[in-house]
Amino acid sequence: MMKSAEVLRLEQVFKSFPATLRGGPPIQILEGIDLNLERSKSIAITGNSGSGKSTLLQISAGLMQCDSGKIWFEEQDISRLDDDALSQLRSRSMGFIFQSSLLLDDFTALENVQIPAMIAGKSEKQAKQQALEMLSTVGMQDRLHHTSDQLSGGERQRVAIARALVNSPTVIFADEPTGSLDERNASVVEDLLFSLVEQQQVALMLITHNNSFAQRCDIVYHLHDRKVEVSS
Amino acid sequence: MKQALFGLLVKRKLGFGANRAAKRRILFNLLLITLVVSALVFAQIFVVSMSRGIADKYALLGNGHLQVHTTDDVDFSGYENMIDVQKVGQSYALIYSPSANKMVRLKGVQDTYFSELRLAQLTMGEPYLQTESNLPQILLSTTLAATLDVQIGERVALMLVSQSSIRPQLCIVQNFYDSGYQELDANLVFSDYELITRLFQGKEDTYYELLVDGDTLQQTKQTLQADGYAVTSWDEENYAVATNLNTSRQAVLGVMVAVAILCGYFISELSRELVEDDKYKIAMLTLFGATKRLIRQSYFSTVMAVTLLAVLLGTLLGMTLALNLSPLLASIAARSIPSLSYYLLDFSIVIPYLDILTITCVLVVVSILSVMFSLRRVSRIEPISCAHFD
């Protein structure tokens, strides 16, 4: 069960992948992971490439099933939810930021932010209003009608942050959000992300290689040898 | 609102506000389906019109829509839907010219036979007007005249065969006619009704040729039969031709429907292509919480909107091309291209609405089914897939 302050709790999570398509012994990725994230707090997961950081994030967000263990999100065991319930949960309570922003390239920056709000059931007008406000917050008010290919990497990532926050989620899952940016832009995006997380009282689960970025989180977990340990 | 989101997704997939590549893809597919549909519609109109044109030639010049087999004088004015009634006599004879001969069907008709309706099916030359000779005059087709190598005003001999004797009868070629369909023209010779009765002395086949409103043919036939008349219709009199025409129409319709099925299947390729190209977008939309049903519906609506618009445009284009075909056919007919000599090139365009509806409905139904089937792949795209594009 979850404590009242917790929004996400992982209990004894195990995950393995088949070694090859032809079979063979499975490769264990995660082994007995216990982890929790409290409301308005931030955690960072660090570790070497291939250590299973992204897998841990995907399991935590219900995007991937674990072999065993429990994942509690807002007091629900998400491994028991069906597709529709998970879709609703993601729409209402989760925001995602990826390394390469993954904006929908047929749509403008405004529409990219507006769409998640519309999926969450907002009217077109409301969704547009919220998207406008969120894009202004990330400093993109002058680039509303630009498409993905007309924006720089830093700008795209700012739109991705606005998109992740537009439905006022409980948790933001960010997988290497500055991984593809230069130092200056990475610093701008880092500052923006942390200031918005603090301002909107959102919990953050951050996957990063960057130690200084990770150190800005309340707790830093290090994933090593299939297990997590608190590193600070 | 989901409706607004659905509208936005469909609008963008259709190319409104989208990049050039997306617009080009939609336009290319729209154009391709339009061309296929227009070709199908055009071909079906052409075949149906030509077969009806041939049937009209046989009905108007050959035997009439209905034949009442009686030698009595009958007044058909009390019957509804009669367009024309002609008493005719016919028999067979060998026709001789100095250079050739041929077995012909000799049809004796009265002065009123070549009404405007029948003349519309023919082209005629200038008639031979000299009257010094007492020889009877006959009307040959240009096809037969070419076979016999005779000109207007020249003499030909008819060899009349009866049970007891063989009798020659000299005639003058009064004029040439051309119905545009050589199969019919090749052995049909017109003469005066009185000449036939005089030459064959009751051995000729005498009957009434009735032209009736096409929709009431069967009803009129039944009424006449109920009144005790021996009645046949044009398709019974020309069974082989009517069967061939009908079989050709059905076969062509079958081919058109088969092509429509293939086209419907091809349309599912558009949906497959759209989904393949949009995999990460679909994954992202599901990540944001969009249901697979909403995504499938948006792709389905996009593809079907393109399909229905293309079917509509293709049908209109095919019909427009077919309706403007007459000048082209007339020009081809005027060139007397030998390989086309046995095709009817002079016919009215008839739009076979039921056939067109069948073809387009089959295409739309097959495309609906195949697109729905191909969009099952949307269900296989999980939100986790977006991680693969990261």
Image (spheres, coloured by chain):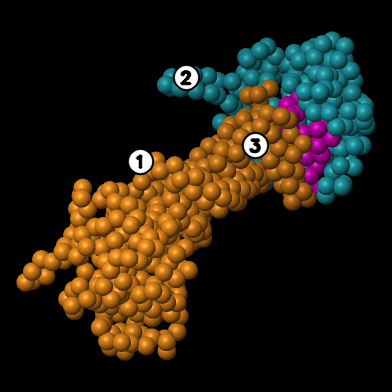
Q: Residue at x 6, y 72 (%)?
A: B164
Which residue type carries mark 2? Thr
Which residue type carries mark 3? Leu
- Mark 3: few, some, or many residues within 10 Å (few <14, many ≥20)? some
Disc 2 vs disc 3: which is toward the camera?
A: 3
Q: Please provide percent x and percent y for residue B56.
A: 40, 63
Q: Quadrant of residue B74?
A: bottom left
Mark 3 falls within which chain? Answer: B
Residue A120 in magenta? yes
Residue A38, above or below A74: above
Residue holding disc 3: B27
Upstream in sequence: badge 3 or badge 1:
3
In contact (CB < 8 Å): disc 3 and disc 1: no
Query: Which of B134 and B208 lies nearest the eye of the viewer?
Result: B134
Residue B372, above or below A214: below
Residue holding disc 1: B339
Mark 2 falls within which chain? Answer: A
Disc 3 vs disc 1: which is toward the camera?
A: 1
Q: Is residue B31 left or right of residue A2?
A: left
Q: Which chain is cyan?
A: A
Boundaries of the magenta span: A101-122
Tell me the CA gap for discs 2 and 3: 43 Å
Q: Which chain is orange?
A: B
Q: Quadrant of the C terminus of chain B?
A: top right
Q: Which mark is residue B112?
A: none
**Callout 3: helix, strand or loop?**
helix
